[in-house]
Amino acid sequence: MAGITWFRRNLRITDNAAFQLRFTMAGVFFFDQQWTGDWLGIARCGEHRRNFLQKSLHDLEENLRALDVPFHSITAEPEVELPRLCRQLNVDEVHTQALPAYAERQQATRVRQALMAIGVRLIEHDDYTLFPTTLVAEAHPTSFTSFSKFRKKLTPYLDQIIVAENSPSLHLQSLTNQQAAVINEYQDITPPDPRAVMNFIGGETFAQQHLVQYCESALFHYKETRNELIGQDYSSKLSPWLNLGCISPRQVLAAVKQAERIGGANASTEWLIVELMWRDFFQFCALERGHELFGGSANRLVEPNSSLSLEKDKDFTRWQHGATGHPFLDANMRELAATGFMSNRGRQNVASALIHDLGCDWRLGAVWFEQQLIDYDPASNYGNWQYIAGIHANSRGGSWFNLDKQAALYDSEQQYQALWLTKS
Ligand SMILES: Cc1cc2nc3c(=O)[nH]c(=O)nc-3n(C[C@H](O)[C@H](O)[C@H](O)COP(=O)(O)OP(=O)(O)OC[C@H]3O[C@@H](n4cnc5c(N)ncnc54)[C@H](O)[C@@H]3O)c2cc1C
């Protein structure tokens, strides 16, 4: 049967169940509401993520062109434009990726109905997470309330995760000629700020290059460095590529396993896999909780699901712009604004400060992160914010960090604060 691949958070041609040469006649991506809309008066997608997305789409288009598959990027809602494209190309099927978050599932339902009306089938493939949904439903049939329980139940299944057959395995080897040519083409691109942790360039080609490079060395000290704040190697920096699907979590797992076979497993290689499981945990929480992912409040003054007003929150504005007067907090917020990235340590601290010190509603912070983060993902972002606010999955009822102590512990020489509080 002839079909279209509707690319969502799977912007790659390898290990992608929704893209198969035997059925894909054309590929399409939609700049829909999640890219063009706003929420609480804040545009949902900022400059850094938009640039990263555009590079990712360009790379995908080039890779598809090499396979003679035409690709369209369309600014519209898919339920409006996909039926028209299907008629134009005379196809019977649309293949896409199943996504766990509420708005994305609602969107798939609308698309399914619009396609059904013209006799076209929507087929969703389940590969955004490491563990397939059916496996998780079997291994963990109860509610997702604790990460440690999730980890315990799913760890025995890690050995069953294999990269799809259509995927070239990720050998830790030098680049192919095609990859090297693409990387050359982009080598003059500089990061948005010279202080950025690294130059994030969107696309499958760069994702694979970065994964290979990371697994060759820095992976082996991940557990010791993961709470650091400066530089490329303290953590994997894979999140932007993972969340647009330039690389799949299964490909990351396969590369880590391969690195373990070559260099030996250690606490760091094992911990990176635990972090991939955190990612899955938040995805399955989102799948289970639907619109509750955006509700609730840790702040007693704000009723759950109340409509929020930005004007009331002067503290929020100062927080947003890194102008609270607390150097550790401000440094992190300025890094985010300048580069679209912030370390996990930084994210935990600035989220805790907004909720528990400044008393603002967590959703304001989460929406700001949605706009700013180059690696924004609905389940990971809103799930982590809810975790810190104590709304879901946090047995301590929330996470509060003492900013002064955290700064003394993780930035004892104030190098990080100096880096971001001094004008570049
Ligand atoms: C308030 C807040 C908001 C966040 N928003 C996002 C978001 O929108 N998108 C996002 O990918 N992560 C988010 N995180 C989680 C985490 O901060 C980032 O995944 C991590 O900093 C990305 O850097 P890395 O790739 O170097 O991670 P590494 O430390 O190298 O971890 C490897 C991978 O594991 C996954 N991972 C690690 N920690 C987490 C976590 N706590 N939750 C979910 N996945 C995790 C990521 O996919 C990451 O790429 C958020 C955390 C907080 C506290």
Image (spheres, rainbow, N blue to C red):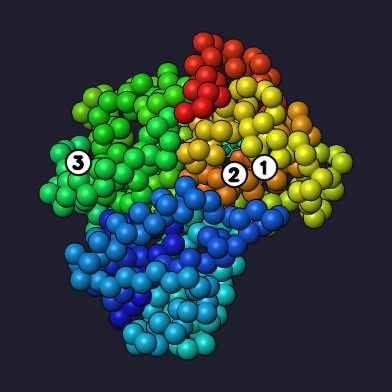
Looking at mark 3, is its residue's CB closer than 8 Å to ligand 1? no
SS of the residue at dot 2? helix
Give how far apart the Cα atoms at labels 1 and 2 are.
6 Å
Residue located beneath label 1 in the image:
365
Residue 72 found in image quarter: bottom left
Q: What numbered label is drawn on residue 8?
A: none
Give how far apart the Cα atoms at labels 2 and 3 are.
35 Å
Name which residue type carries label 3: His
Residue 287 found in image quarter: bottom right
Looking at mark 2, is its residue's CB closer than 8 Å to ligand 1? yes
Looking at mark 1, is its residue's CB closer than 8 Å to ligand 1? yes
Which one is in front, 117 or 147?
A: 117
Whether residue 391 sits left or right of residue 66 in the image: it is: right
Give how far apart the Cα atoms at labels 1 and 3 are.
40 Å
Point out residue 348 in the picture as x, y percentages from the top left corner.
60, 31
The answer to whether the residue labelled 1 contacts the one labelled 2, judged by CB atoms less than 8 Å apart, is yes
> Residue at image x 54%, y 54%?
45
Residue located beneath label 2 in the image:
369
Image label count: 3
> Residue at image x 43%, y 72%?
74
Point out residue 256 in the picture as x, y percentages from the top left corner.
31, 35
SS of the residue at dot 1? helix
- For this orientation, the residue located farthest to the front is 423
Asked whether the viewer can see residue 224, the reply is: yes
SS of the residue at dot 3? loop
